[in-house]
Amino acid sequence: MPSRPPRLVVISNRVPNPGDKKAQAGGLAAALLDALGDSGGLWFGWNGKVGNVYRPDPTIGEQAGITFATMELSRRDYNEYYNGFANRTLWPLLHYRLDIAYFDRQQYSRYIEVNRLFAEKLSPLLRTTDIIWVHDYHLIPIAAELRALGHKQKIGFFLHTPFPATEIMTALPNHDQLVRSMFDYDLIGFQTEKHKRAFLDYLRYELGAEVTAKHVELDGRRVRIGVFPVGIDADQFKRNGADAESLVWHRNLRRQHGDTDWLIGVDRLDYSKGLIERFRSYERFLAKYSEFQRKVTFFQIAPPSRAEVPEYREIRHELEAEAGHINGRFADLDWVPINYINKSYSRAQLARFYHESRVGFVTPLRDGMNLVAMEYVAAQNPQDPGALILSRFAGAAEYLDGALVVNPFGPDGVSDAIAMALDMPLEERRERYDSMMAAIEGNDVRKWGRTFIQALIKIRRDRAAK
């Protein structure tokens, strides 16, 4: 009989409520649940709740053979670890925004302390035969904390964001301490070759690490580095939006906005998404290509996030002002050129929106991958697909060669791409769509999960054989 795979333990900043089907609908959550289900795994992290004191131990729940171990954050930890160092220091730094990165020693100390707390609370739940998969920038030092507690399991780390150039990374106080802690992992994964190369450049030129084809070595510790591009469940997304409720919703929307071509942007409200630049490029398009006025409607869906962080409140005010300016300049009684919407929609509604939009407008200033670009393509009608405008600074640009790739900092180039997308002949749209769908279907989200886990298991087997 084949041996049972080792139990997988996933550690992430947030863990979905096992009873919340909406929270599990997203591609990443579905992929992790699928991987955990293969081995009856454990998912550990924050449950999204904020209390006045720590819970003494995690709350344990189980569903479909998967154990969920979750805990609250104290108000202080939420402010200093999550809203503080993670989202006011690391997030802007990883997205090349040194101008708004906030450095505070107390917040860094709290970041380390919360990682230590997570390791201490997880420790009694671990088995010696487990493999552990840690996710994202919130938890970079947790492997070092687990090692300090004596754990020798194989531990992998996946960074969902970009890794910045060395000149950016070294602006972070204690950058070397943070990166050195990553050598307590056995495998580190990135979205793209560019992100991997930036990390290796930092290790080589800043820390003096030895870089070989198979691993990186520093101070006697070795770690393997790989590229594992995340994807989507394309088949599931194709099925979304075909339900009766979404179709009725769409018909009402079409009736309200008339017979115009739609551009669609869907982004969390975040300065890394390039929304201000996108709005200004659209304004340039309307001025430069006046023949499209009254023929195009741009929908920008941007649900608010991290409202307690000052920079996020500021960008919301800027976008409201910019949208008002564009509509004030170009709108007429029967046409509103830009619809800026601060609310969430169901995945089925978004799939229908994508399906009916002539242009997908995805222009982040910096992004790890950007799954919206893939979702837009997957939702298209293969016989009459729309065109995708994609920032060169999104990780997806390395894989979706059928997109119109643009520099989001150049409004003239983006405005030209909008006109090109709207005028693109059907045959060209089909060719570009076929190319992108081949890439999307060849590397779906479940393949991403399986590939990373298999690489981590292989490291364990290779070292056990020595």
Image: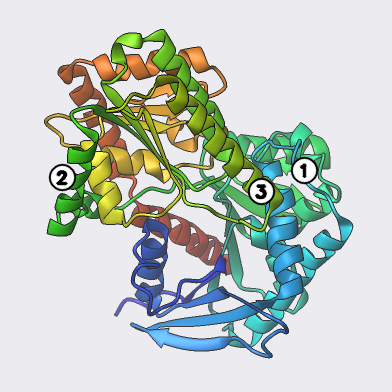
Give the mark, 1 or 2, whose residue is nearer the N terminus.
1
> Helix, strand or loop at disc 2?
helix
Separation of disc 3 and disc 2 at Cα? Answer: 39 Å
Q: Quadrant of residue 150?
A: bottom right
Residue labelled with disc 2:
251
- Are circles 1 and 2 on residues that touch, CB within 8 Å? no
| Image vertical order of residue 252 relative to residue 99, above or below | below
Residue 292 in percent (x, y) is at 30, 15
Q: Which element carries disc 1, helix, strand or loop?
A: loop
Three-letter amino acid code of the residue under disc 2: Arg
* Residue depicted at 47% across the width and 15% down the height: 284
Dot placed on the residue nearer the N-terminal end, 3 or 1: 3
Label 3 neighbourhood size at 10 Å, few (<14), some (14-19), many (20+)? some
Q: Type of residue at label 3?
A: Trp
| Residue position marked by numbered label 3 in the rendering | 91
Pick the front one: 429 or 213: 429
Residue 220 point in image, percent of width and height: 79, 55
User: Which of pointers 1 and 2 indicates the residue nearer the eye?
Assistant: 2
Q: Can residue 5 be seen in this view?
A: yes
Q: Which mark identifies residue 209?
A: 1
Q: How many labels does the image show?
A: 3
